[in-house]
Image (cartoon, rainbow, N blue to C red):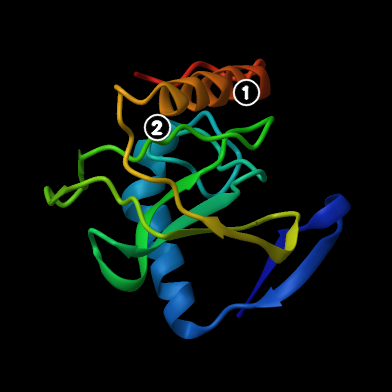
């Protein structure tokens, strides 16, 4: 079995579709897509809100080294960068995961960020020195926080603001 897909530059391709993939695609079309689309969307794959999945979709992976999560590299979080500017909102603060796990701030001795998604080939990666625990009584920490917040607001001028 094959399927016609439209790729980069609107170019159409014929792609083989395996038996298992065909099963899951048919099941999605039968059981889920019509509920999501409410009959109004032509694209095949839709978000949980019934909107088309955009072609932006850069996924940011954030890791910490020797942090409260353990020794070595540990995943702090993963999230989708915002369209159109690629920014994201995140803070190293205590939080609760989707699974209900309570996690402390993931401050580590080093940080690593990797980005993957459409238009990011090869994956983009960065690694740098970690930050110390934030101390509100430390004027240098407070000044750095203010500068970074100003920079974030500038970079995100075309996006909705982060929740505080």
Above or below, 6 against 16 in this view is above
Label 1 crowd (10 A; few <14 / some 14-19 / many >=20): few
Q: Name the residue rendered at 52%, 21% in the picture.
A: 149
* Left or right relative to 44: residue 55: right
Name the mark on residue 151. Answer: 1
Above or below, 86 against 1 in this view is above
Q: What is the C-alpha distance between the residues marked 2 and 1?
A: 31 Å
Q: Name the residue rendered at 80%, 67% in the picture.
A: 13
Above or below, 98 against 160 in this view is below
Q: Is mark 1 on a helix, strand or loop?
A: helix
Q: Position of residue 31 (x, y in %)?
A: 31, 52
Q: Where is residue 17 in the image (x, y as percent from the top left)?
A: 58, 78
Q: Is mark 2 on a helix, strand or loop?
A: loop
Name the mark on residue 14. Answer: none
Q: Nearer the viewer, residue 128 or 56?
A: 128
Name the mark on residue 49. Answer: 2
Q: Where is residue 50 in the image (x, y as percent from the top left)?
A: 44, 34
Label 2 crowd (10 A; few <14 / some 14-19 / many >=20): few
Q: Which of 51 and 109 is in front in this view?
A: 109
Q: Name the residue rendered at 46%, 60% in the picture.
A: 110
Q: Position of residue 29 (x, y in %)?
A: 42, 54
Check the picture and name the quadrant holding the N terminus.
Answer: bottom right
Q: Residue furthest bottom?
A: 19
Q: Nearer the viewer, mark 2 or mark 1?
A: 1
Whether the residues at callouts 2 and 1 have beta carbons within 8 Å, the answer is no
Q: In which quarter of the image is residue 3?
A: bottom right
Check the picture and name the quadrant holding the C terminus.
Answer: top left
Q: Name the residue rendered at 60%, 49% in the picture.
A: 58
Give whichever of discs 2 and 1 has the lower sequence position: 2
């Amino acid at each position: 079995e094959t399927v016609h897909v439209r790729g980069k530059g609107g170019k159409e391709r014929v792609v083989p579709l395996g038996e298992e993939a065909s099963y899951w695609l048919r099941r999605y079309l039968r059981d889920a897509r019509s509920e999501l689309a409410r009959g109004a969307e032509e694209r095949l794959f839709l978000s949980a809100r019934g909107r088309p999945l955009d072609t932006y979709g850069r996924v940011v992976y954030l890791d910490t080294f020797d942090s409260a999560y353990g020794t070595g590299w540990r995943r702090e979080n993963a999230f989708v960068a915002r369209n159109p500017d690629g920014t994201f909102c995140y803070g190293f603060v205590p939080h609760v995961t989707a699974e209900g796990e309570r996690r402390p701030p993931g401050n580590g001795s080093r940080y690593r960020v990797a980005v993957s998604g459409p238009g990011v080939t090869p994956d983009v990666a960065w690694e740098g020195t970690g930050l110390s625990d934030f101390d509100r009584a430390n004027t240098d920490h407070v000044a750095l926080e203010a500068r970074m917040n100003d920079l974030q607001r500038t970079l995100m001028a075309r996006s909705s603001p982060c929740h505080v």
